[in-house]
Image (cartoon, helix red, strand yellow):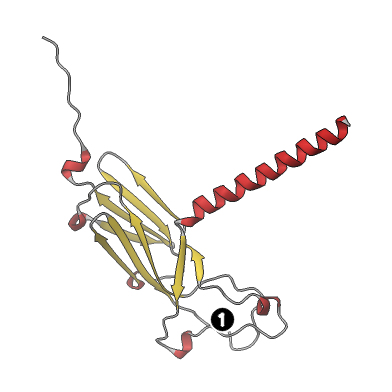
Amino acid sequence: MDRLNELKHGLEETWHSLGEGWRQVLDRASGALTRFTPSGRDKREEIPPPAAGSASAEFPSSSWALLAGDLYEDADKFVVRLEVPGLDKQDLDIEVRGDVLVVRGEKRYEQESSSGHYRIRQCAFGRFHRSIPLPLPVLANKTAAHYRNGVLRIELPKAEHARGRRIEVRTG
């Protein structure tokens, strides 16, 4: 009977661990999940359908993808980093609307070759936009963005009234 209880306890712990892992994945990915919509600009950019009988034929290419990002804060500014590989800087549009940073872009499909077919297709292509809520007001006119090695880095200086001020307590 002890062995059965140990097995039951082990299964409960495993189930709890799996559930917690999925909750963490969902929490982390929920903000990063981004919808890509077809651009429809150029026939050359259309993504070919998967080959008949291939594994990917059962799972059509998704128009959703993860754009991983970080929001860092120090005393004077927020820094947003987004991983957006495969873009040129002219494919990006950045805007601050009130307390939200909006990043739009377009990832274009480029044909590797004219022969062959996909077996796995996980990359998303098309237009996307990502909205990132900012915890405090920022100076939109002093925002700076840099794009290097597939990482977009945006620095948003905090508004003066949002920075706060340390007040020293004096005696006497």
Residue on which disc 1 sits: 112
> In the rendering, at what x and y percent does residue 54 appear?
71, 80
**Residue 149 position (above or below residue 172):** below
> In the rendering, at what x and y percent does residue 67 appear?
46, 61
Residue at x 41% of width, y 58% of height = 82
Say which quadrant the C terminus sits in.
top left
Residue at x 21% of width, y 40% of height = 163
Residue projecting furthest to the front: 1
> In the rendering, at what x and y percent does residue 130 appear?
38, 63
Residue 104 picture quarter: bottom left
> In the rendering, at what x and y percent does residue 118 appear?
64, 79
**Residue 166 position (above or below residue 148):** above
100 with respect to 63 (left or right): left
121 with respect to 70 (left or right): right
169 with respect to 134 (left or right): left
Residue projecting furthest to the left: 172
Say which quadrant the N terminus sits in.
top right
Give 43 or 114, whichever is nearer the viewer. Answer: 43
Residue at x 63% of width, y 82% of height = 50
Using a 10 Å C-alpha cutoff, classify the residue at mark 1 as few (fewer than 14 neighbours), some (14 to 19) or many (20 or more).
few
Give 18 or 119, whichever is nearer the viewer. Answer: 18
Q: Amino acid at mark 1?
A: Glu
56 with respect to 168 (left or right): right
Give 87 or 132, whichever is nearer the viewer. Answer: 132
Give 41 or 27, whichever is nearer the viewer. Answer: 27
Residue projecting furthest to the top: 172
Residue at x 70% of width, y 45% of height = 15
